[in-house]
Image (tube, coloured by chain):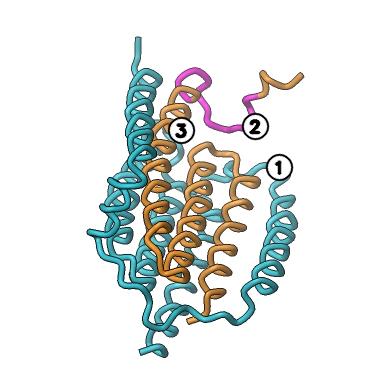
Amino acid sequence: MLIAQNISFAIIAAVMIVGAIRVVTTSNVVHGALWLVVVLAGAAAQYVLLAAEFVAVTQVLVYIGAVMVLFLFGTMLTRSRIGRDSGLNNTYWKLGIPVALALFAAMAIALVDSFGSEKMPADGAIVNTQQISDQIFGPYLLPFWALSFVLLAAVIGAIVLARKD
Amino acid sequence: MFVNQFLILAAILFCIGVYGVIARKNGVMVLMAIELILNAVNLNLIAFSMRNGSVDGQTFALFVIAVAAAEVGVGLSLVLLIYRNRRTISLDDLSEMKG
């Protein structure tokens, strides 16, 4: 059981990392969006591995369903070249590599230092959707309300920004 | 399963996203890199939810997903507006705020 979990983690993680690297290096905007789908689906699979089914389903619905459609429409409406495009990177894009590597080194040192070889609890708390809803509509009710206002404001703001007049 | 394997995967995704934000010029591609960063954060939240055996992490991840959806909506409409006014979404050309 544990070995199967570890093997599936390794496969999904490798696919996610390859996909993420392709998102930031591809020279084609549409291919970038499709590689992003791979990363998001991999993240949903990791959530299932971590016993968070409801978040995994929400990830698939919201990210792969809605956000990707938004991205593809954004690509179409801004008439980004639907093929190879050499002008996607900054002139100083090489600066990003040392920044990312330094950031990763700092985070890796901190993580290995503080968690070392600590294991996940084997039985793992079984969290079901009912518990999540009890949380959202109980102690997190006020943030939930605030979030619904944020979404309303975002929808109205997006319409106001994007309409022609 | 180690706790660290998920956290380090999230760290790798975060760093790739940061590289994308720095290196990309196209506005839509920058937004995609920001999505990578937000997903790394979500992976951390879920991993800690399992480690601590509590629901709080998953609740926070749901909030993050909702905020990310709002962010993408407003961000893409901003990119659209920039395109409509400037006929380009290259972020290098937006230099009016430079002193």
Q: Quadrant of the C terminus of chain A?
A: top left
> Left or right of A132: which side holds A11?
right
Distance between the alpha carbons at the discs numbered 3 and 2? 17 Å
- For disc 2, the marked residue is B92
Question: Which quadrant would residue A116 be assigned to in this image?
Answer: bottom right
Whether residue A154 is in magenta: the answer is no
Q: Nearer the viewer, residue B64 or A97?
A: B64
Q: Quadrant of residue A9?
A: bottom left
The N terminus of chain A: image quadrant = bottom left
Q: Which mark is residue B79?
A: none
Looking at the picture, which amino acid does disc 2 mark?
Answer: Asp
The spot of residue B78 in percent (x, y) is 46, 27
**Vertical arrangement, residue A138 with respect to residue A79, above or below:** below
Please state the chain letter of the residue tagged with numbered disc 2 in the rendered image: B
Give a yes or no on whether discs 3 and 1 share a subunit.
no
Q: Secondary structure at mark 1?
A: loop
- The residue that disc 1 covers is A91
- Region rendered in magenta: B83-94
Which of the 4 image quarters holds residue A151?
Answer: top left
Q: Which chain is cyan?
A: A
Q: Position of residue A99 (x, y in %)?
A: 73, 54
Q: Three-letter amino acid code at disc 1?
A: Thr
Subunit that carries the residue with mark 1: A
Chain identifier, colour orange: B
Percent x, y for residue A71?
Answer: 38, 42
Closer to us: A160 or A93:
A160
Residue type of the residue flagged with mark 3? Gly
**Mark 2 closeness class: few <14, some 14–19, many ≥20 residues within 10 Å:** some
Cα distance between the residues tagged 3 and 1: 23 Å
Q: Which residue is mark 3?
A: B75
User: Image point 46% across, 52% down: which residue?
Assistant: A32
Q: Secondary structure at mark 3?
A: helix
